[in-house]
Amino acid sequence: MSEFVYRDVAQPLQRMVSLVRNFAEDPLKPLPETLSAAVLDHPLRETVILERALVRLSCLLQLGFGEAGAAMVGRSLQRTPEADVGGGLGENYGKILNVGRVVHAFFGFCDICYFTDLTEILQADVVRVVNSVAKIIHRSVKDNSGAPNKNMGDTFLLVWMCRAGLGVRTVADASLRSFIRAVLEVSRSKDIRKMSQRSDVQTRMPGFKVQLGFGLHYGWAVECAIGSDLKVDASYLSPNVNLASRLQAATKQYGVEILISGQTHSLFSPSVQAMCRQVDRVTLKGTVHPMDLFTYDVPATTVDGISVVDDHIISSPDTTHQLFFSALQPALSDRFRQQFSAAMELYLGGHDGSQADWKRASQILSQLCNQSGPRDGPSQAIRSYIKRRARPDGSAPQNWKGYRALESK
């Protein structure tokens, strides 16, 4: 082989084959953002174009399929007898892609509140809001041991799995930290604030600001390719994923930004568990056993436009969980939380509801709702439910079991 052929043809082909092999072995491995100067200055421009296209296509595969699709992409690129038959995925779809695996993970759903109204007002400009929010959420999740999975208009599916060196409590705390950071960064974003303060938005929805709702649940799911040989999505199938979605939808009923299942709450570190508060015990659609619901009251980090918490603490992945949570204590006072906890005990009445005292619970909740400052969503939600369901004397109904069926989703 001549020096010309080796330098201008063989070497570029070897680099491209190496790229494909490495990508097949680890589809999530970071790829070079640009080609080296030596490659770009190559005299045979065709090989430069091919190499650049291969890197860009690989980057698009990483973006499009993400962590859930890594195994699927790897299998489709690996040299197997099935992969050598035919030129496309059509006849090999079942052999290469139609494989799932059971995983255990934290599943989070995020929703942009009042998105329908916002879309009607902003029209095409709503894309700027969605992508600004997505950038914040995706980066927050990625920095905290998670992976964005699906973008569905105004809704995002997010996943955290335990990996080597990361215990379940560490990952659990990281998932909640992702939500808190996203809420704070969205509230502090100048670009998002500018869009929400447009005159046409404020005329239609006075006082509007972009708000998020999050649901978080832990459980098993099947990680797989969903679709056909015409269109494939890499995602997760499980009732646990659906539960996370229903928790997110329920944030509107409780007037909170974050709802956490009791199963997930039990996996937090003890210090983080203590910072959450229980807001109800319910059965959700598709569930039989009652589930405790918790929230984390995200604090305000600015006063009169001035930051009272260092941006580095909120956004830096180098900040330890201990420092992050110690700097971002729940918004409500200890006294408020103690009173609310007492009201919850009276409302639930133990594991079977036999000790419930709805009359006293309603009195405490009324006091909490009448305190100065923003009204507390969970206090209002439980008080409203007691008013609708209590007997004429204010006591719990005879069939009260210590939990209720959530009335919507």
Image: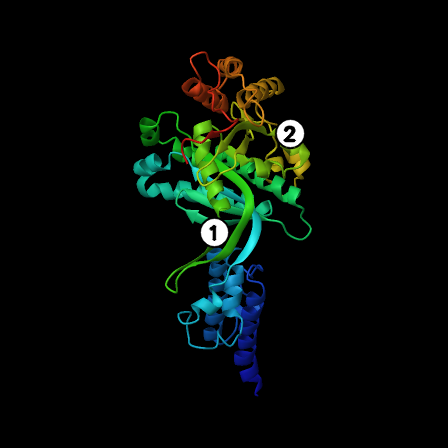
Q: Are marks 2 and 1 in contact (CB under 8 Å)?
A: no
Picture residue at 43% right of the left edge, 30% below the top: 252
Picture residue at 54% right of the left edge, 84% below the top: 5
Foreground residue, 88 or 207? 88
Asked if 398 appears above or below 393 in the picture, the reply is below
Foreground residue, 206 or 265? 265
**Mark 2: few, some, or many residues within 10 Å (few <14, many ≥20)?**
few
Mark 2 and mark 1: Cα distance apart in space: 32 Å
The amino acid at mark 1 is Leu
Asked if 166 appears above or below 210 in the picture, the reply is below
Q: How many marks?
A: 2
278 sits left or right of 201 in the view: right
**Is there any visible trace of residue 184 in the rendered image?**
no
Asked if 280 appears above or below 104 in the picture, the reply is above
Dot 2 corresponds to which residue? Answer: 274
**Is there any visible trace of residue 73 in the rendered image?**
yes
Picture residue at 54% right of the left edge, 47% below the top: 159
The quarter of the rendered structure image containing the C terminus is: top left
Quarter where residue 117 is shown: top left
Quarter where residue 131 is shown: top left
Foreground residue, 231 or 349? 349
Element on which disc 1 rests: strand
User: Where in the figure is residue 180, as x and y percent of width and height?
Assistant: 55, 35
Element on which disc 2 rests: helix
> Which residue is farthest front?
398
The amino acid at mark 2 is Ala
The quarter of the rendered structure image containing the N terminus is: bottom right
Dot 1 corresponds to which residue? Answer: 237
Q: Nearer the viewer, mark 2 or mark 1?
A: 1
Picture residue at 44% right of the left edge, 71% below the top: 92
User: Where in the figure is residue 272, as x and y percent of width and height?
Assistant: 64, 33
